[in-house]
Amino acid sequence: MCTYLTETVAVDGSGKGAGGWFTLTQASVYVDHPQHAPFGHTVNIDFANPGQGPAARVAVELTEEAALALVAAIQTALASAPAGLASAAA
Amino acid sequence: MNDAIQAETTTIPGAGGDQIEAYYARPLDPQPRGGVVVIHHLPGYDAPTKEMVRTFAVNGFAAICPNLYHRDAPGASPDDAAAFVRGQGGVPDERLVGDVGAAAAFLRAQPSSNQKIGVIGHCSGGRQSVLSACDLPEGTLNAAVDCYGAFVLSSPPESSPMKATSLREKLPRLSCPLLGLFGGDDQYPSPAEVDELEKELTALGKTFEFHSYEGAGHAFFSVNRPAYRPEAAMDGWSRIFAFYGQHLGA
């Protein structure tokens, strides 16, 4: 099914797309049909900078298990580093 | 009989006179023929949709698919354009209707046109096919096909960024026969919503024909996705050609 539901968050950082590195301004997360992954539905994440046009995008399509494992890995990695080390305010 | 077709990217004046990209395919045999406007799905103006356009040409129709994302993402790859437009909440209904009307006018202006034009869309395009058949002036479209269009009767959840809204209030203006093809396992639209739509159209005295396929879910026509269901898709294509043969024939 098409969920049409999209969670969008503002992000600070950079991503590497087809045209090289660019500044990221937002990430969109949605559970919907993938373009490439061989599944009916996936967790799709677009790291993007709409101000630089549609091609300023790093896209991933993950299974539910992979997405949850990624969330856990991010939290573990952050917990392993000194608090605030990767903060925008650091 | 000449079975050659010609297929190419062209430019047509869309809604508001904007020049937009479109994929156009037609048989080279000059005999009069009907035309089909193909509305691409939410994932964009992609290769499988262009294959559908060529399939209509192979089967004797002139067909055109306007790139609904051309203004928002000119020159972008279909997936990048789709992600970009998705983030903006999709295509505005008014612009979509204008683009479909302009594509129909383009087909009608061709020397081999028999002046009969159909429209077809899948997924978001299914809803947009019904929308076009309600909003365009009577006589613009002669037949409409809705392949598992969601939000024809229901509206997206409030949390959704999609601009799509229910077409319930527009249905009395449905101006041409409608063929609906649905998956029994789909939730958007659900079988209950398809049943409700059937009741609404019956109450309105509209000419329509619905088919639902057990064992098929959303996007069962998509040959490049796991949702593809060959049996449902093959039967669906035969229904489409029979329907257009009846309503777009000479």
Image (cartoon, coloured by chain):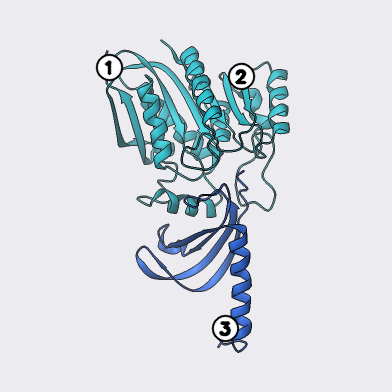
Chain colours: A blue, B cyan
Same chain under badges 1 and 2? The reply is yes
Count of marks overlaid on the render? 3
Disc 3 to disc 2, how far (Cα)?
A: 59 Å
Disc 2: which residue: B209
Residue at (60% x, 63% y) in the render: A67
Residue B232: image quadrant is top right
Residue type of the residue flagged with mark 2: Glu
Disc 1 to disc 2, how far (Cα)?
A: 31 Å
Residue A38, given in percent of the width and then of the height, sits at: 51, 49
Disc 3 to disc 1, how far (Cα)?
A: 66 Å
Label 1 or label 2, whichever comes before in sequence order? 1
Q: Chain of mark 2?
A: B
Q: Is residue B25 left or right of residue A51?
A: left
Residue type of the residue flagged with mark 3: Ser
Q: Secondary structure at mark 1?
A: loop
For the N terminus of chain B, the image quarter is top left
Judging depth in this view, the residue of B192 and B113 nearest the camera is: B192
Disc 1: which residue: B29
Judging depth in this view, the residue of B6 and B168 nearest the camera is: B6
| Res B137 seen here | no
Q: Dot 3: few (<14), some (14–19), or many (≥20) neighbours within 10 Å?
A: few
Q: Secondary structure at mark 3?
A: loop
Q: Dot 2: few (<14), some (14–19), or many (≥20) neighbours within 10 Å?
A: some
Residue A85, given in percent of the width and then of the height, sits at: 56, 87
Disc 3: which residue: A87
Q: Chain of mark 3?
A: A
